[in-house]
Image: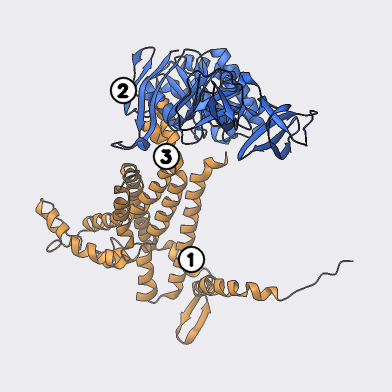
């Protein structure tokens, strides 16, 4: 068990990075507290896996330090870091039985046989693998194999952190749900720090207490799922989380409030200083837009009924605004106007939120 | 009632295959079977002999000797080439510019015609003018492959190892390259030693390609003819007369068509049987 700190970590796969584009990770400063369930969320190629491999010691960061409980472990090899990692594709040792697979990390560390037996049975019970303990691991299904990968991490009692690198990619949809709840349950049972890398927001938001959103080698925001939803710190977070993502409307700031074509919009905060920025936008989630008698005039482009609610695509001039309308609510046909819930209306300058 | 239409035109479509198989397999094989049960005289006069030639071959000391030589040769080269090939594959770089350099260097021996390999090694190993022969004699060993059976065996084996280890290497390398990085990373985290990585990851993942490599090397080496024929001509004496060299001597040297045909069939059955045994043994675990 440990607190994990990344201290000004940067990483580049190039030998001599000079361009900004050469950096896969651009200056990451984070602390994960002991026992938390974290998710690392971001699109493919944003640096999530690089970050994970730096924590596990499979990569040495080009700059910066990695600390476990304030102890610098940047140069300590993976097997001495007391970490466990579950990969995207299940890794099992084909020629061994399930039992031997689970016992492998312990036997490599010369743990006495009796202790190995006890520990393997305990973990197998947790993962519902008891019945197949003496079968060949290569004959299990993908989710069974992924459980073994996980089990090899859990079996060591000294793990500081368990890391998951998109572990559900190859699992059938109906088993994904089961395995995900299993992970959640295990986290509560054993209480070790878990870091879960994924590009699937549902996975991240259901698994983690805190989600770290990454984009282009940078950490955009760290927060609870609710924070990410209600107050994204960057337009990328607003856009990436939510379905559909946050609406972005170009605007100007007048008298401390944003305005679109002379229509004043009330935002969550009064903005005292008129910002000098290249791009000023209002960010509002489709959930917080509604049709009202007065407001911004729009035309309706398309209505998408997806069962529990409808997604109405509207347009004001050249800007598309999506609105989520609950089933049963009326959608005006003649001269529709919309307004935004002020509490969830944020203004972004060059992508970053204004407060 | 359903009318079944019979369309005899279908026969024309399989005809090319039938003709091809007939000419390249069935007819030659049946010719051999035909010779193996008859006594042949000039003017194509044949007398039925039954299994006489088979009995004669199976009881002949000459056949036993060449079979024993053949088995020893094949075992020795398999025992050298397979571990050596795997070892070379393991030490080859996985990425970078050296990969192509290594692959081309490895493939070179495989591209040389077999009789050229024999001729090359013949000159290379000659005790008076060959580089290898002079060197061995120079460091104090009495070496002359044209006169000493041990020296001849040493040269033939060295030549085969030089010629064919690359095949095992290339196949093993292909197997190694197909192992995803995650396996090595997981093994590192699990604290596996490099022996464990080899034993539990690399070897199991190479199993299929190694099976192919062993089968190919077994069959090829069991049928070896050209290289030792050019290098030693089967000598000195009969010391490097392997089965196919012996067979050619009987069939084309002595023109004993009956015994030669019987020996061919026995030879063929031995290869078939041993290949089957190898394959079954190596694939045994897949089924469990």
* Image depth: mark 3 or mark 2 in front: 2
Secondary structure beneath label 1: helix
Q: Chain of mark 1?
A: B
Whether pointer 3 and pointer 2 mark residues with C-beta atoms closer than 8 Å, the reply is no
Residue B200 visible? The answer is: no
Colour displayed for chain B in the image of the structure? orange
Where is mark 3, residue-wise? B203
- Give me the residue at 39% from left, 68% from top: B247
Q: Is residue B235 above or below residue A299?
A: below
Q: Position of residue A146 (x, y in %)?
A: 55, 30
Callout 1 and callout 2 share a chain: no
How far apart are labels 3 and 1 at the CA level? 36 Å
Q: Quick one: B97 or B67, which is closer to the camera?
A: B97
Secondary structure beneath label 3: helix
Where is mark 1, residue-wise? B265
Q: Which mark is residue A75?
A: 2
């Amino acid at each position: 068990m440990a607190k994990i700190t990344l201290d000004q970590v940067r990483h580049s796969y190039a030998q001599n990075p000079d361009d900004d584009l050469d950096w896969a990770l651009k200056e990451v400063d984070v602390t994960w507290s002991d026992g938390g369930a974290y998710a690392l969320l971001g699109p493919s190629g944003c640096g999530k896996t690089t970050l994970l491999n730096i924590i596990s010691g499979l990569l040495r960061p080009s700059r910066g330090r990695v600390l476990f409980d304030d102890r610098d472990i940047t140069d300590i090899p993976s097997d001495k870091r007391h970490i466990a990692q579950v990969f995207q594709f299940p890794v099992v040792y084909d020629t061994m039985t399930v039992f031997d697979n689970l016992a492998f990390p312990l036997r490599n560390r010369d743990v006495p046989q009796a202790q190995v037996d006890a520990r393997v049975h305990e973990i197998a019970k947790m993962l519902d693998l008891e019945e197949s303990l003496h079968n060949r691991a290569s004959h299990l299904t993908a989710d069974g194999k992924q459980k073994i990968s996980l089990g090899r991490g859990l079996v060591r009692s000294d793990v500081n952190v368990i890391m998951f690198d998109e572990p559900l990619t190859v699992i059938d949809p109906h088993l994904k749900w089961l395995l995900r709840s299993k992970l959640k349950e295990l986290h509560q049972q054993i209480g070790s720090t878990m870091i879960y890398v994924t590009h699937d927001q549902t996975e991240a938001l259901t698994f983690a207490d805190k989600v770290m959103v990454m984009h282009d080698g940078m950490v955009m925001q760290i927060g609870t799922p609710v924070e990410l939803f209600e107050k994204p710190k960057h337009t990328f977070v607003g856009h990436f989380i939510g379905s559909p993502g946050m609406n972005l409307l170009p605007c100007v700031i007048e008298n401390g409030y944003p305005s679109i074509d002379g229509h004043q919009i009330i935002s969550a905060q009064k903005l005292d200083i008129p910002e000098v920025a290249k791009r000023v936008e209002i960010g509002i989630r489709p959930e917080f837009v509604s049709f009202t008698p007065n407001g911004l005039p729009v035309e309706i482009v398309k209505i998408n009924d997806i069962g529990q609610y409808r997604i109405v695509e509207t347009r004001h001039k050249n800007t598309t605004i999506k609105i989520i309308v609950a089933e049963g609510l009326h959608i005006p046909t003649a001269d529709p106007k919309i307004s935004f819930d002020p509490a969830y209306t944020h203004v972004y300058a060059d992508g970053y939120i204004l407060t | 009632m359903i009318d079944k239409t019979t369309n005899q035109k279908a026969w024309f479509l399989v005809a090319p295959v039938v003709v091809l198989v007939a000419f390249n397999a069935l007819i030659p094989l049946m010719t051999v079977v035909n010779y193996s049960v008859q006594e042949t005289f000039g003017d194509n006069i044949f007398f039925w002999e039954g299994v006489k030639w088979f009995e004669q071959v199976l009881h002949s000391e000459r056949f036993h000797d060449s079979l024993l030589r053949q088995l020893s040769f094949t075992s020795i080269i398999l025992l050298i080439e397979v571990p050596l090939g795997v070892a070379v594959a393991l030490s080859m770089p996985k990425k970078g510019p050296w990969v192509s350099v290594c692959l081309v260097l490895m493939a070179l021996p495989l591209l040389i015609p077999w009789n050229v390999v024999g001729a090359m090694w013949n000159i290379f190993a000659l005790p008076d003018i060959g580089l290898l022969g002079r060197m061995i004699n120079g460091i104090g060993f009495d070496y002359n492959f044209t006169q000493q059976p041990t020296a001849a065996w040493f040269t033939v084996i060295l030549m085969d190892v030089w010629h064919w280890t690359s095949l095992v290497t290339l196949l093993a390398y292909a197997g190694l390259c197909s192992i995803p990085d995650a396996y090595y990373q997981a093994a590192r985290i699990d604290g596996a030693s490099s022996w464990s990585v080899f034993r539990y990851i690399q070897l199991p993942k190479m199993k299929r390609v190694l099976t192919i490599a062993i089968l190919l090397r077994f069959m090829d080496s069991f049928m070896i003819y050209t290289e030792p024929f050019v290098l030693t001509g089967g000598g000195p004496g009969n010391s490097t007369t392997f089965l196919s060299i012996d067979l050619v001597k009987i069939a084309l040297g002595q023109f004993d068509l009956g015994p030669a045909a019987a020996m061919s069939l026995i030879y063929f059955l031995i290869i078939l049987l041993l290949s089957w045994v190898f394959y079954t043994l190596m694939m045994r675990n897949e089924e469990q």
